[in-house]
Amino acid sequence: MTDEVKPLFDRRMLEALVCPLTHAVLSYDAEAQELISRPAKLAYPIRSGVPILLPDEARRLD
């Protein structure tokens, strides 16, 4: 039995997800576990493998 570690977020989901405000494509920041919307200047968190695409939960990018 192998102890292979699986990533919490499936990158294939990026093809279906867009920013709820701008409808722009999101980029994945694996280190921060966030989805980045450059046009909206927001970083949406990923918690337990689930993207939280709520603007109120997003971190503002400077």
Image (cartoon, rainbow, N blue to C red):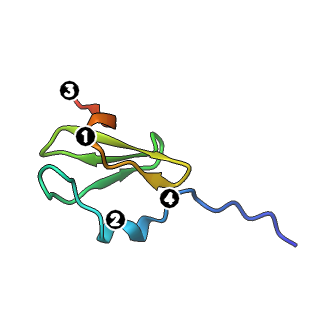
User: Residue at image x 24%, y 38%?
Assistant: 42
Q: Amino acid at mark 1?
A: Pro
User: Residue at image x 41%, y 71%?
Assistant: 12
- How many marks the image carries: the answer is 4
Density class for disc 4 (Cα within 10 Å; few <14, some 14-19, many ≥20) is some
Of the two numbered discs 2 and 1 in the rendering, the one whose residue sits closer to the viewer = 1
Residue underneath mark 4 = 9
Asked whether the beta carbons under mark 2 and mark 4 sit within 8 Å of each other, the answer is no
Of labels 2 and 4, earlier in sequence is 4
Of labels 3 and 1, earlier in sequence is 1
Locate the N terminus and report the quarter of the image it occupies.
bottom right
Instruction: Please state if 25 lies on the left or on the right of 10 as rendered.
Output: left
Asked whether the beta carbons under mark 2 and mark 1 sit within 8 Å of each other, the answer is no
* Residue 59 locus on image (x, y percent): 31, 32
Of labels 2 and 3, earlier in sequence is 2
Question: Taking 34 as reference, is 1 above or below it?
Answer: below
Instruction: Residue lying at the far top in this picture: please name it.
Output: 62
* Dot 2: element: helix
Q: CA distance from mark 2 to mark 3?
A: 23 Å
Q: Amino acid at mark 3?
A: Asp
Q: Which mark is residue 32?
A: none
Q: CA distance from mark 2 to mark 4?
A: 10 Å
Q: CA distance from mark 2 to mark 1?
A: 17 Å
* Dot 4: element: loop
Of labels 4 and 1, earlier in sequence is 4
Density class for disc 3 (Cα within 10 Å; few <14, some 14-19, many ≥20) is few
Locate the C terminus and report the quarter of the image it occupies.
top left
Q: Amino acid at mark 4?
A: Phe
Residue underneath mark 1 = 55
Of the two numbered discs 3 and 4 in the rendering, the one whose residue sits closer to the viewer = 4
* Dot 1: element: helix
Q: Amino acid at mark 2?
A: Leu
